[in-house]
Image: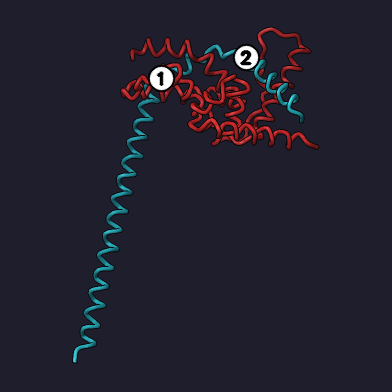
Chain colours: A red, B cyan
Amino acid sequence: MAEDDFSALVQTTSPRLYRLALRLTGSPSDAEDVLQEAYLRAYLALSEGRFEGRASLATWLYRSTVNAALDALRRRRRRLALSNWYRPATSQPAEHTEARALLADAAALLAALPPEQAGALVLTQVEGLTNAEAAELLGCTEGAVEQRLIRARATLRRRAEP
Amino acid sequence: MTESELESRLRSYREATARVEVPAELTRRILAGLPQRAHARRSLRDALGACAVAACLGLGSGLWATLETRALERQLFLQVNVWADAP
């Protein structure tokens, strides 16, 4: 693939993948690192002829981003709070404060989960994938995804109890 | 926390992250130095591969030396016993 084609690929796919990485990691700096890693893996695979074309390039990049994000979560369990970076496009100060609080709250909840459980929860409940689609991305069975979701919900309920 | 409270928090997370602005310079930062980083990654991979081969060779030669020593010990043991049993 030519440099210009790869550049166009990054341009078109990066907004969606950035949001995915952000939702999985809960941190803008981690999300950017994840994207750097995912595109580096794609660049290497394409330049070495390892991309077999069994899935579309966009799907392959989506999977690569999920894997890189889970790797980042395993390395860095401690996530940054979202409260210092959120910048809504249009907002009143009161809305802004409320949105920041909501984000920080949700990010703190997800940070309490092991990466596999957080991944299953974000992919199904935030990204809106089916359990089967999440299972394919996470390299596990649909049953395993269901188990992770049950455990994640139980963990979150326990943590919220006084 | 009830199930509906959790759903509500996750919905807020989805909506808030959907509105997040993608950093303006993101594409440029991703593409900047990509060939150099790819080269560095390949070099690292090659070095790790070489280390793995060296480790396997070292392990193999160590194992071979151990087996040889064991065989020699066994031979000596038998020899000593033969001498001891000799009339």
Q: Residue A114: image x %, image y %? A: 60, 36
A155 displayed left or right of B42: right
A55 displayed left or right of A94: left
- Amino acid type, residue under disc 1 in the picture: Ala
Name the residue beneath numbered marker 2.
B18
Callouts 2 and 1 on one subunit: no
On the image, which quarter does residue B40 sit in?
A: top left
A102 displayed left or right of A142: right
User: Closest to the observer: B32 or A136?
Assistant: A136
Name the residue beneath numbered marker 1.
A55
Q: Residue A96: image x %, image y %? A: 73, 14
SS label for mark 1: loop
Residue appearing at x 33%, y 25% in the figure:
A50
Taking the view exactly as shown, the residue that stands out farthest to the front is A143
Name the chain under label 1. Answer: A
Residue appearing at x 21%, y 85% in the figure:
B83
Residue appearing at x 60%, y 12% in the figure:
B21
Above or below residue A99? Residue B82 is below
Q: Residue A68: image x %, image y %? A: 49, 28
> Badge 2: how crowded within 10 Å, few (<14), some, or many (20+)?
some
> Badge 1: how crowded within 10 Å, few (<14), some, or many (20+)?
few
As drawn, the label of residue B37 is: none
User: Closest to the observer: B8 or B68?
Assistant: B8
On the image, which quarter does residue B14 sit in?
A: top right
Name the chain under label 2. Answer: B
